[in-house]
Structure formats: structure tokens, C-alpha cells
Image (cartoon, rainbow, N blue to C red):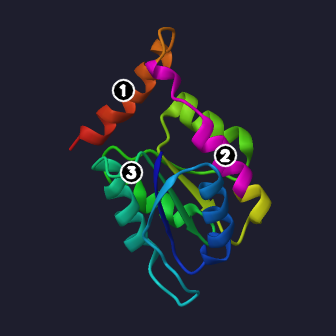
Amino acid sequence: MRIALGMDHGGFPLREALLEVLEKMDCEVIDFGTDSPDRVDYPDYAEKVGLAVQGGEADRGILVCGSGVGVSIAANKIPGIFAATCHDAYSAQQGVEHDHMNVLCLGGRVIGDELAKLLVKQFLNATYLGDQPDGDRYARRVGKIIELEQKE
């Protein structure tokens, strides 16, 4: 699986833990940085990751800022991106299964390394149920979200 990874300075403390778990899961990482704790603007990284997922360069994305909220807001401005901040395993899995989440957002100042690794595993091991024979309700709901994106 190809994973686009991006973070600002607030997410930088989780960088090594995320790279470690992605490597163990045999993911191909498209690393957009940042690669230092120097201050940068999170919308720049959300755009890079979001466009990589939108354009098919990456299968899914992971974004990290201090709270996870800023990168989620920014990424969701890109059509076709379903980004959510998750700080528990259920949401990281269910967000993919029910809501077609394709970008996981984490708060580098909210969670630690071990929880971040667990959330990434849950996110990447989950499959969208709307593509399953009995997944009509999920596909219908996601379709309504796509309709919202297309409204002017």
C-alpha cells in the first residue's frame, strides 16, 4: 500500500514511530515531511498529502499536526478527501469501514507513539464496507457526502 505522510512541527515528535510502523507493514511511504521541529504551516502538508491521495499517487494518507484538527480541516477542502482526526482505535477502523476515510489525522501533542502505531494499523487494515455486496447503506451515505462536495 502506498501511503502519503505529512506533518507540521507539532506532528514531528510522532514521525519516527509512524515511519517504523509503516515500514513493518511493508508500506511504500511517500514522505512529504516535515523533517525537523522548525515551525511550518500545516495547510501546506495537508495539501500535498491530499493531492497525492486524490490523484492516485497514494492509496491513503496520514497527516499529523499538534491536535490533528488543523490538518483535517485543510485536507477536507480537497474534493475526494475524507479526512478525520482519530485518537481511538474504533474510530480509526470504523472511519474507513463506514465512512470511506482515506486520510487519518493525528494529534502529535495529544497521543503518544504506541497509540499512534495502533491507530495506523487499524486505519490501514480496515476496508471500506460500501464496496461489499451488503454495503448499500454505507455507499448511500458516502454518496450523499460526495453530493455535498459538488454543491456550489
Q: Which residue is mark 3?
A: 58
Across and down, in percent, residue 114 comes to 79, 59
Q: What kind of residue is marked 2?
A: Lys
Comparing 88 with 62, the one in front is 62
Comparing 54 with 57, the one in front is 57
Q: What kind of residue is marked 3?
A: Ala
Comparing 34 with 111, the one in front is 34
Q: Which residue is mark 1?
A: 143
Across and down, in percent, residue 34 comes to 49, 78
Image point 48% across, 45% down: which residue?
1
Q: Secondary structure at mark 2?
A: helix
Image point 54% across, 90% down: which residue?
38
Instruction: Tell me the quadrant of the picture where the C terminus can be found.
Output: top left
Image point 44% across, 24% down: which residue?
141
The earlier-in-sequence mark between 2 and 1 is 2
Q: Would you call the spot at circle 3 few (<14 residues within 10 Å), some (14-19), or many (20 or more)? A: many
Across and down, in percent, residue 124 comes to 58, 42
Q: Secondary structure at mark 1?
A: helix
On the image, which quarter does residue 95 sit in? Answer: top right
Q: Which residue is mark 2?
A: 121
- Estimate the spatial distance between the alpha carbons at disc 2 and disc 3, rounded to whole Å: 17 Å
Q: Which residues are magenta?
A: 117-131
The earlier-in-sequence mark between 2 and 3 is 3
